[in-house]
Image (tube, helix red, strand yellow):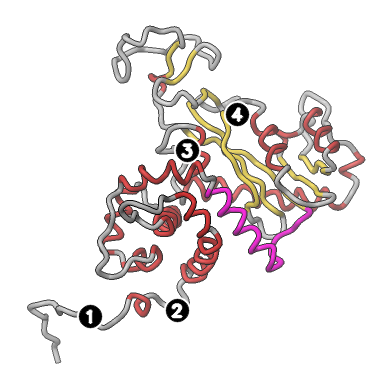
Amino acid sequence: MRGETPTSGKLFSYVSLEQRIPKDHPLRPIRRMMDEVLSNLSPRFDEMYSRTGRPSIPPEFLLRALLVQRLYSVRSERQLMEQLEYNLLFRWFVGLDMDAEVWDATTFTKNRMRMQESNLADEILAQVVEMAGQKGLTSSEHFTVDGTLLEACASQKSFRPKDEDDNEPKGSDGRDFHGEKRSNKTHASRTDPDARLYRKTNQGEAKLAYLGHAIIENRNGFVVAGCVTHADGHAERRAALSMLETLRGDRITLGADKAYDVKSFVEELREQGVTPHVAQNNKNRRSAIDRRTTRHDGYAKSQACRYKVERVPAWTKNIALLRKVKHRGKDLVGWL
């Protein structure tokens, strides 16, 4: 028997938002972990907000919304707000009721600086790493580091001489910079002064960019530390040494690719009590890694685990859509 098409919708629904989400949905364990982290950070939220005035959007809602935006490759916060209007899964994850009004996208802009100054991103990462450690899912001895290029939100035409008159035409004015000798010492971007002209390989195109860095533990490939720096030839090694200070362990190993095979870097690792499991770069020079390191089985095992760190920039650029960042300034890009 053919079913009839209803001519009018139902006025009430007796199925709760919780019932509409499948019991085995992968967002459920992520939501539980996020709730635990945010519960631990509740005292920090109290310090960030005044006790008087009009109530604001709960920071827990904003942080969950930013997380689901990255997980589901939503391109912008305005599109995220549009999704929250009709996407029941997103509403459930963020914590909004079925009839709750969605806030304006500019709320992120107004609250981002407050969260950035409070270093919430670092604390959330530290809490998640601690949770994984308590469950025995992370290694406390063996790590791998890598860096990746993050294209800045600035055009090549914005990269102008530092001593140029500010009253001269800017932007898409038809100016031809081809053949002009440009460097970070003499030029700077008018759009994003923190961006640097940089290319990751000798064959690659020079772009206005930042460098993103991450350290993973080798057992399951979990990120345990991360940061963003200005793009230059020494940034990857400086960032690695800086992030190592946050790691605990009496004697740890650090794997890396050939770009880290530099004598000064290897020596500094050894001074800090870190065993350098860096890939050897024997092309046109002598590697800083010798038989003292390579003869041990642990060196080969670290090299075998090094592929796991490549998942971090792959996910960041393809899923989280940060191949070309949409915000300006090193601190803000690093927080995101």
Mark 2 or mark 4: name the one nearer the start of the chain: 2
Q: Looking at this view, is 71 or 122 the one in front?
A: 122
Element carrying mark 2: loop
Which residue is labeled 4 in the image? 201
Please say if 201 is above or below 47: above
Span shown in magenta:
120-141
Q: Nearer the viewer, mark 1 or mark 2?
A: 1
- Residue 260: give x, y in percent of width and height: 73, 34
Q: Looking at this view, is 29 or 72 the one in front?
A: 29
Give the residue at x 47% y 18%: 188
Which residue is labeled 1 in the image? 13
Q: CA distance from mark 4 to mark 3?
A: 26 Å
Which residue is labeled 3 in the image? 332
Element carrying mark 4: loop
Q: Nearer the viewer, mark 2 or mark 3?
A: 3
Outermost residue toward the left? 7
Sort mark 1 into few (<14), some (14-19) or many (20+) by Cα contacts within 10 Å: few
Element carrying mark 1: loop
Q: CA distance from mark 3 to mark 1?
A: 42 Å
Residue 132 on the magenta span: yes
- Residue 153: give x, y in percent of width and height: 41, 32
Q: CA distance from mark 2 to mark 4?
A: 47 Å
In the image, what residue type sits under mark 3?
A: Leu
Give the residue at x 76% y 39%: 279
Q: CA distance from mark 1 to mark 2?
A: 20 Å
Mark 4 or mark 3: name the one nearer the start of the chain: 4
Give the residue at x 69% y 64%: 137
Q: CA distance from mark 4 to mark 1?
A: 58 Å
- Residue 72: give x, y in percent of width and height: 41, 57
